[in-house]
Image (cartoon, coloured by chain):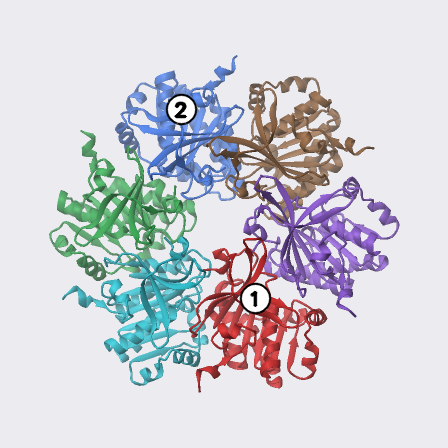
Chain colours: A green, B cyan, C red, D purple, E blue, F brown
Amino acid sequence: MSLYYDLVPTGIPGLDEALGGGLIRGRTYLISGETGTGKTLLSLSFLINGIYKYGEPGIYVSVDETYDQLMNGVRRFGWDLEALREQGYLEVLIPEMDIIEKIREKDPITIARSLVYTIADYAKSLEAQRLVIDPIAPLVTLEKDVQVLREYIRALVMGIEREVGVTTIITTEIPTGARVISRYGVEEFLAAGVFVMGLAQTTEGDFKRYLFIRKMRWQAVQPTILEVEIQPKVGVVVKGPLKDVHIPFYALMI
Amino acid sequence: MSLYYDLVPTGIPGLDEALGGGLIRGRTYLISGETGTGKTLLSLSFLINGIYKYGEPGIYVSVDETYDQLMNGVRRFGWDLEALREQGYLEVLIPEMDIIEKIREKDPITIARSLVYTIADYAKSLEAQRLVIDPIAPLVTLEKDVQVLREYIRALVMGIEREVGVTTIITTEIPTGARVISRYGVEEFLAAGVFVMGLAQTTEGDFKRYLFIRKMRWQAVQPTILEVEIQPKVGVVVKGPLKDVHIPFYALMI
Amino acid sequence: MSLYYDLVPTGIPGLDEALGGGLIRGRTYLISGETGTGKTLLSLSFLINGIYKYGEPGIYVSVDETYDQLMNGVRRFGWDLEALREQGYLEVLIPEMDIIEKIREKDPITIARSLVYTIADYAKSLEAQRLVIDPIAPLVTLEKDVQVLREYIRALVMGIEREVGVTTIITTEIPTGARVISRYGVEEFLAAGVFVMGLAQTTEGDFKRYLFIRKMRWQAVQPTILEVEIQPKVGVVVKGPLKDVHIPFYALMI
Amino acid sequence: MSLYYDLVPTGIPGLDEALGGGLIRGRTYLISGETGTGKTLLSLSFLINGIYKYGEPGIYVSVDETYDQLMNGVRRFGWDLEALREQGYLEVLIPEMDIIEKIREKDPITIARSLVYTIADYAKSLEAQRLVIDPIAPLVTLEKDVQVLREYIRALVMGIEREVGVTTIITTEIPTGARVISRYGVEEFLAAGVFVMGLAQTTEGDFKRYLFIRKMRWQAVQPTILEVEIQPKVGVVVKGPLKDVHIPFYALMI
Amino acid sequence: MSLYYDLVPTGIPGLDEALGGGLIRGRTYLISGETGTGKTLLSLSFLINGIYKYGEPGIYVSVDETYDQLMNGVRRFGWDLEALREQGYLEVLIPEMDIIEKIREKDPITIARSLVYTIADYAKSLEAQRLVIDPIAPLVTLEKDVQVLREYIRALVMGIEREVGVTTIITTEIPTGARVISRYGVEEFLAAGVFVMGLAQTTEGDFKRYLFIRKMRWQAVQPTILEVEIQPKVGVVVKGPLKDVHIPFYALMI
Amino acid sequence: MSLYYDLVPTGIPGLDEALGGGLIRGRTYLISGETGTGKTLLSLSFLINGIYKYGEPGIYVSVDETYDQLMNGVRRFGWDLEALREQGYLEVLIPEMDIIEKIREKDPITIARSLVYTIADYAKSLEAQRLVIDPIAPLVTLEKDVQVLREYIRALVMGIEREVGVTTIITTEIPTGARVISRYGVEEFLAAGVFVMGLAQTTEGDFKRYLFIRKMRWQAVQPTILEVEIQPKVGVVVKGPLKDVHIPFYALMI
């Protein structure tokens, strides 16, 4: 088995080259960034490219918008997710708030297992090979102890990797202005790779979007800052190395 | 249905062009900024332009001033809100403090629902299509757990979007000097768009007001810093891209 | 009624011009600054000018000094407050510490009401039109919950505006080195205007005093940094725009 | 009574000129600074100059050293405090630790009163006119609530000013690297004046000692940074304005 | 016994020269760094070089990946850990999560002892001379008191040094953006040496990996920043002193 | 008795000149610094020079290493501590961990007294004149209240100064990256002098070690930054004023 076949191409123009082929099949990756940096569009690009370019069904889990808001939104980008759903290539899971609340009363490990089994069921019937959880925060227990949280997220990530077997992207919202790359400070250590999305200001005062490849476990990928664009019907597109902008170090968390 | 009709023009000179048409109908937007940066005037401009330019009735919810103080204040800008009220185009809701206190004793989700239903009643009788909550803080439960707060604000925002169906602007006060864009650190993730208002100092030491388009979910809007002015009888006016000023990065929260 | 008559001139040389006439009658303004920046002198200048220039009686509420210390201090500036008291133009309220302690045992809203009624009584008998509370901290409840504090300060400010009807200046001490403009982080949102006083160092190493007009609700006042001087017998005098100094941004809280 | 006689000269060469004569008789002043900046020597210079130059007896209260350590230390500077004690010009109060511990079990206001009465007794028998408490921290209650602490320090300062009637210098230790000018964040508001002592590094890398006149209530003193030296037999000497050094702003707390 | 023989060469090209020979036999060293900086690869290089170059068996303890994920990952670097296991040169310990959870319910000192005895058993049967714990965090008790944590880590480190007798590398994850070199703030004081791994950006915007020799107890090693590369089949390689990059001071924690 | 004889020379080449002779006999000094900055070697140099150059027996108290690790380590520097022990010039106290744990269950003042009496016993039989506690942290109670800690450390320091009568050096570990000079924020105020050890980077990127004389109570010592080197068989050597390096201000805590 060649090394190449271990990798899942994202299908995002320019990104797979930078990754030396793609993501490791069956592992979990983190996209982190402040609000408005393109996390949702990047993760949707991963799913939709998976379907169109590689025939890999996918599951999108979200809570922050209603089903209709999400569908109206993606339609503005020229994507027809409903057609993909009807063709059996995509499942969109948007748990009702009261279900989430009930789940939360249980202990963290039970919650993690329950989430894993629910996703596993859908993945099985769809033969899904890609999964996006966007963002992870609403699915996180109310537990505030950082070490318990770490165990919870570990149980969730490891459960998905063992029971569901899909390649997963999890997005995480960084509170604006915080010098961290994950909300709970532990997600990055449990992910096989970390992307940081952000905005950078050029010396002329304009803004450019960037994607920073922060960590790629077991892959000989050099850390790189890529300029990205958001294009209707296409989603996120990598333009090449970011140039001529000032990015404060803390934004890259180096 | 063309994409154009999905958008609600703010009617603020120069802003709709920058937004590619306006805000997404039925969604909620956040205006954040420190004290004295123009949040109230921007949100009132949205309401009043809605009435005068597009015939869309609106509701203004506030707590920080009495009805008379508000009316006296807006009159200084040449706006006659009382006439708009009498003509049935505007409702101004200023809950009494003791009502707020009673509400607060209930649990967060119940409070959110109660607020949603009250606003829905007024919106129905007025056929309101725009809503401003300025600021959100006094309507927030006393709960201090950030995850419970997030649920509360989520219930409030989603309730308004589902039950009231108006396009909403919520303002949030950033404690001065804090490097955040929202008081509770979660509002920005629940809003379909985020504007940051602020003051910038030119190299000559003068001050300019700016409006930073920080996030526009599902809209191909490039993040931009616009110079704004406050003009009597008009409110907030966009002057174009901000130039020749130094804005510390943290003020933009990039 | 012309707009002009809504405004109360401070009588401080140079300041009313910068404010477009003065403060809005009946509203509450905040003077914030670190220790030794001139807050007491500015607020006393407002009161004394009110009496001498406009015949408006005033009330000064303080706790930080004894009556004698205050009188000796102002006498050093050439002001004879005792004569103004005897002529019925001024009342100086310095609550005994044990009274304050007793008051504090009550719940916050009751304390706020009690303070409002006490001040209202004095204001009525004096026909006072100006009020200074210098500083607000000792009158604040021991409550530490920031949201309860906000309610308390709101009840106090709104109570004064509704029950007493004077134009009020409240001073607030910023702990030195803190990047905030108010002690409890909420005062600025409840004030119709905010002034920040401070010290700036010139490139030669000298110090200049400044007054930053940070917020003027409902007034088309451009944010401005004014150089001020402290002059015996006159108090605070505005010298014009501050020049040739370096003020760290955070000192202005922009 | 001329204004001049209200002032107590410190007797420290160069300082009284900068203060326009000295300190206000009967008030309390704060000397703040990190460890090793000269607070003890400045406060002792105030006491010893008071005795030698103006015949004003004084009291020195300390806890941080034993009586012998203090006496050995000052002797190294050529000062003979024991002779001054025998001549009835000076009292050195160094409370035993167990007494302090017993006192601390009482409530804060009682502690403050107890300290005031003890000092008043000594002051009476000595006809003391100057008092130094160096530093205040060990005399502070274990109470951690900052508002209770404020009341405690207020009670202590006001008690000394009313019951003892001396001119007082209190030193306070700033934890190194903290951007504050007092340990508990409230002392500076209760002091009639504040001096900050520190070290500054010249562009050549040498160190100079400075004394920053941060606040002088009711005195028309311009904030100034003075270079000081420590001289055997003399103590602290003011050399004039500090020049050619870089002092980070936060060190001055402006 | 010459000094040279006290040292254990890491076998990492270029590192032993910089260390004056290697690590002190039987002591514990810390590799700290943010996510994605190469801690796992450096510690594996230490183990694998130990086997191939010096015939010293080793033990690798991890929790963050499953056995299969680890084996698949290392295989991508051309390392065949399974062959080393079968030959009796390597043991890979990946405790099940539920075992960890059970262990955690015990008191800290008991946990530390239990871990030490388990490792000692494996070390004995393998005649292991090298040990890697990568990372330490999952093995740390839930205790949050920093002083109890210190005791726990001390008991763990000292227990390994006394009971197991191997030369040990422990990795620790620094939460991204934190200006510390260890997660709990005490590990560095208990280690005989500390390496910090990180990413630095050149003035052209590229990234270089570095290894900072921060502390080498009892070794006359000058603190040095070395550029490192990650090479397939080889692991971490030292390229020499790092040049032409900007590393913010805080990243080196100096 | 001349002033000179009050001083205890450290015997460290170059340091006593900078100190004007040495340390005050019978007082306690603090060496603070991050991990790996040379605190242990400086304090051992003080002890060993005391024995060899001035015939003053000494006691070394530590907990962070075993007796064998310490002895092996110092032997690498060419020091034979065991010979000094056998000759009755040195005692090395390394309390067992379980003893420390038992001690800790007592109240802070009792612990401090117990430590003082134990040290006093050894000092008496050895006629010790120098003492090193390296570091103080493990001997500190688990108490977290900073004011109780202050009392504990005060009791410890004063107890040693009164009951043991030796000249003492205490080392304290600054958590890396913290802008403080002592772990608990109070040690520096209780020490008669404070040294800060650190690493500085030259403009070429090399590192130099420095010793900053931060405070010398009752000694007319100018604050100075000295370059130091660590030399086998000699320990710490002062090279003169530090030059051509950039030390961030916060590292010096000025």
Q: Which mark is nearer the camera, 2 or 1?
A: 1
Q: Amino acid at mark 2?
A: Tyr
Give the residue furthest to the right.
D87
Give the residue furthest to the bottom.
C1
Residue toward you, A205 or B82: A205
* Vertical placement of residue B100 versus E148, above or below: below
- Judging from the image, mark 1 belongs to the subunit labelled C
Q: Is residue C140 left or right of residue B80?
A: right
Residue toward you, E81 or B79: B79
Q: Are the residues flagged by discs 2 and 1 in contact, CB closer than 8 Å?
A: no
Q: Position of residue C92 (x, y in %)?
A: 65, 76
Q: Is residue B236 left or right of residue C217?
A: left
Q: Position of residue E124 (x, y in %)?
A: 42, 20
Q: Is residue F161 visible?
A: yes
Q: Could you tell me which quadrant the N terminus of chain C lies in?
A: bottom left
Q: Is residue C105 visible?
A: no
Q: Is residue A35 left or right of residue B101?
A: left
Q: Position of residue E66 (x, y in %)?
A: 31, 34
- Element on which disc 2 rests: helix
Residue behind mark 2: E122
The residues bearing labels 2 and 1 have C-alpha atoms spaced at a distance of: 76 Å
Q: Could you tell me which quadrant the C terminus of chain C lies in?
A: bottom left
- Which of the 4 quarters of the picture holds residue E72? top left
- Element on which disc 1 rests: strand
Give the residue furthest to the top.
E1
x 70%, y 53%: residue: D139
Residue behind mark 1: C228
